Image (cartoon, grey):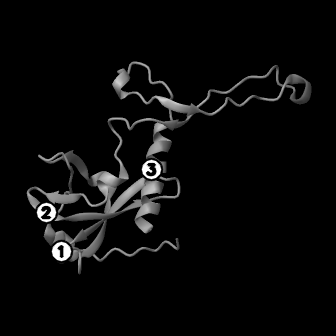
Amino acid sequence: MQKLIIAAATLAAFSSMALADDVMPNTPPDQQRAPSVTAPAAATPNAATSGVAADTPTTAKPTTFNRTLPDEKMASKLIGANVYSGKDKLGQVDDLIVDKSGKVTGIVLGAGGVLGLGAKKIGVAYEVLSFGTDEQGRTRISAPFTRDTIEKVPAFQDASKS
């Protein structure tokens, strides 16, 4: 249940970044998001009631869309992905850390243990990670530290209430 909530929050975070522009000038069509539903433009009150010269609609923004953009990642592809330091597998992504604005700020890395049991969890800042794909097309995440680092840092603790 918690993973579902985190995945939904992450989707909201990525979608809020994507809502910045409906149409992106000078961007190839395959890298543009096609809106499925667009919110109606808001109008300002007219001059008779507010002193504003006339009804002026604001730019409409897409509220739904039909694809991710090339620089976006699906939460479902990140959670469970393996994290490496060079060729050394450090562990896997157990969870995503999302701030109150919906931005992903880090991952919770489960390292060590057997089949996930007894794994040490550490928080890793999102901006230090690099992303790619392995030979099977799965998400591959690289971290700039070693197993020794994992052993030395304190375990991650979730201080959130919900």
The picture places residue 106, in percent across and down from the top left corner, at: 36, 59
Q: On residue 89, which mark appears?
A: 2
117 w.r.t. 136: above or below: below
Helix, strand or loop for disc 2: strand
Q: Residue at x 42, y 73 (%)?
A: 158
Q: Residue at x 17, y 65 (%)?
A: 90
- Looking at this view, is 54 or 22 the one in front? 22
Q: Is residue 79 left or right of residue 62?
A: left
Helix, strand or loop for disc 3: helix
Name the residue that disc number 1 marks. 112
- For marks 3 and 2, give the CA distance: 27 Å
Q: Amino acid at mark 2?
A: Lys
- CB-based contact (under 8 Å), mark 1 and mark 3: no
- CB-based contact (under 8 Å), mark 3 and mark 2: no
Q: Viewer-nearest of labels 1 and 3? A: 3
Q: Earlier in the sequence, mark 1 or mark 3?
A: 3
Q: Residues within 10 Å of mark 3 (few under 14, many from 20)?
A: some
Q: Residue at x 18, y 74 (%)?
A: 112
How many marks overall? Answer: 3
Q: On residue 140, which mark appears?
A: none
- Looking at this view, is 100 or 39 the one in front? 39
Q: Earlier in the sequence, mark 3 or mark 2?
A: 3
Asked where in the image residue 98 lies, by quadrant, the reply is bottom left
Q: Amino acid at mark 3?
A: Leu
Q: Amino acid at mark 1?
A: Gly
- For marks 1 and 2, give the CA distance: 10 Å
Name the residue that disc number 3 marks. 11
- Looking at this view, is 140 or 101 the one in front? 140
